[in-house]
Image (cartoon, helix red, strand yellow):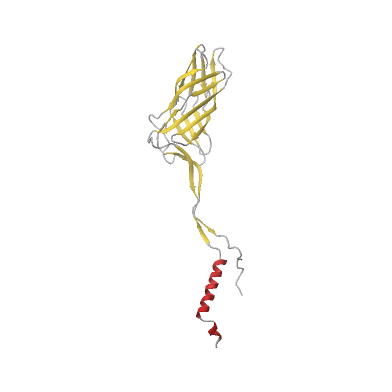
Amino acid sequence: MRVTDKLGVPAVRGLALGVSAAFAVALPAVAEAGPAVLTTGTTVGPAGHRFAASSEGDIVFEAGPVTVTCARSASVPTTGRLNQVPAKPGNSSADGPVVLNINPPAFESCTTNAPGLKASITTNADHGSWQVALRNGAPARLIIPAQGFVLKTSGLLKCKATAAPSAAAGTEAAWTNGTPSSLSFAGANIPVKIEGGFFCPTSVNTATITANYKVTDSTDPASSITVSGTPQHCPLRRAAAPAVPGTAPSHGRGR
């Protein structure tokens, strides 16, 4: 019998399949990794929508011994681009806040903690815009323009408190996405200048505000004004799969 008869066609095929399988185990597979999506920056939406901010509950101002409580406050859209989310791409920022210009808020039905002492609040945009700066993952800020908020008391005591007396000033707030979303102030500091008679607390230079505003979408009441991160897509890449345990890489040709 010839030697070639012992290594027939079936045997050769089996040997070839065994070698192929060995190489398949030894060589690492190359896998396609899809584009990674990272969330950075800030996007406020829906782009171009108008919004209103209305108080929920009392708005409380405290300056020294004087406490002023207002029953209602609101900033609503009128004309122009006030109380409007910027159109794309202005509604997104890669590394800073998205700033919304708003109408000066109105304050109504204000009272004080002192009998016989009345209070009234006026707001204006004579020296700049009222703004809300929103940044994903960070506190919001309300920017009051210079002399844009004036609180006056009358009756037994006539005092005048001007917020941001010499330059625009910001105060911290908390933004919460929801239906509707909210902007809340919890004893947030505001620089003030108080003027008036002998009993007015003229040495006080900081007041606080505690309030909660519901922010509603005026363009589409079924929608909500929201703050989120901006998706950033990384390019497609190829990644090598880990080697199978128990195998070793080849170093040159076999003998």
Q: Residue at x 51, y 76 (%)?
A: 13
Does 248 appear above or below 77?
A: below
Q: Residue at x 50, y 80 (%)?
A: 9
Does 63 appear above or below 40?
A: above
Asked whether 54 or 146 is in front, the reply is 54
Q: Residue at x 48, y 43 (%)?
A: 230
Asked whether 177 or 205 is in front, the reply is 177
**Which residue in the rendered view is the most extreme toward the bottom?**
1
Counting from the top left corner in percent of width and height, residue 84 is at 41, 34
Counting from the top left corner in percent of width and height, residue 54 is at 44, 28
Task: Please say whether residue 123 is visible from this viewpoint.
Answer: no
Quarter that holds the C terminus: bottom right
Question: Residue 252 falls in which quadrant of the image?
Answer: bottom right
Task: Please say whether residue 215 is visible from this viewpoint.
Answer: yes
Counting from the top left corner in percent of width and height, residue 142 is at 50, 30
Quarter that holds the N terminus: bottom right
**Which residue in the rendered view is the most extreme toward the top?**
156
Describe residue 222's horizontal placement relative to residue 177 as left or right: left
Question: Residue 27 falls in which quadrant of the image?
Answer: bottom right
Asked whether 13 or 216 is in front, the reply is 13
Asked whether 1 or 239 is in front, the reply is 1
Counting from the top left corner in percent of width and height, residue 195 is at 54, 16
Q: How many marks?
A: 0
